[in-house]
Image (tube, rainbow, N blue to C red):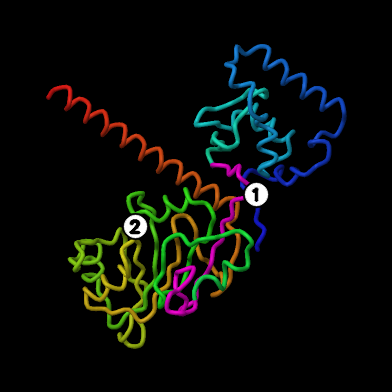
Amino acid sequence: MNDSKNPYGDEADEWDEPDEGYETEEEANAAAAAEAAALSKKDAQPQLHEGVRLQKVMASAGVASRRASEDMITSGRVRVNGEVVRELGRRVDPDNDEIAVDNVAVQLDTTRIYIVLNKPVGVVSSLMDEHGRPDLREFTNQFEERLFNVGRLDSETSGLLILTNDGDLAHVLAHPSFGVMKTYIAKVHGRVTPQTIAALTTGVDLEDGFIAADKARLLENQGGGNFSLVEVTLHSGRNRIVRRMLKEVGHPVVDLVRRSFGPIMLGSQRIGTMRDLTKDELGQLLTLSRASKAREKADSERAAGAAGQSDARG
């Protein structure tokens, strides 16, 4: 798996320093005194004295050393459940509280795994294909943890597929109601015109309903006009949707590759290889997930409030 630069800054590379990141006993004592002072000044609620110290949780999550985490906290870079925290004495529940640094979400559960697979053509997006075709076990069996795929790619389509054991994140990424964008590059028969691109974004009627691409553009025409490369971006999760849309506008697909999934890009990753999400990519995905769940909760509460008002009037 590839290592990556930590988005929280170079100081995060120090998280495994001995003695919690303090070079001298005086520094450790000073930090403890500052924490005690913060607690004595704050008229804290009882739950603030429960849980684990915020800087310790951040260090355990690999954000930074405890000392560097304390600097982040006191400088106002850390949020707990959406609120800026500056007190070193703040305690959190790693199982329930949400932490963000510089407005980027932090994963506190170190048992979670996030893998980017460049799925080859001929592999079924299933963990056990009932017809005996090559499936994702070729890749998931390399891990002790049980991983599952986020969404699907048909067997003839290659490209970016996320494997994880994080069910909450998978739900947000895969469900079209959350609007996570996916980008595909298709090689199609024939010369694609600007009118064809406009038809894709205006929308077409398929057997299972109307569908419009969120974005579409012509990349190039090839082979004297016999083939074209088209980029299509959409949030729909309907089966074989890109292939069906392009066939509907008169350009059947020859080859199809998914190049991005939300903020995750396939880049130059070779077909059939896997890599870990970078911390930056994971932070973006978690931030997207939390924002989407917050919107869903707000929409649900508004709907419940409207229903209550309607009942009251009735």
Which is in the foreground here, disc 1 or disc 2? Answer: 2
Most distant residue in the left direction: 314
**Image: 23 above or below 200:** above
Q: Quadrant of residue 205?
A: bottom left
Tell me the residue that label 1 is attached to: 6
Tell me the residue that label 2 is attached to: 235
Residue in the image at 49% along x and 44% along y: 287
**Which region shows up in magenta?**
105-134
Q: Nearer the viewer, residue 287 or 307?
A: 307
Say what amino acid the circle numbered 1 marks: Asn
Quadrant occupied by the N terminus? bottom right
Direction from residue 41 to residue 161 in the image, left or right: left
Residue in the image at 51% along x and 28% along y: 83
**Image: 197 above or below 264:** below
Direction from residue 39 to residue 231 in the image, left or right: left
**Image: 303 above or below 45:** below
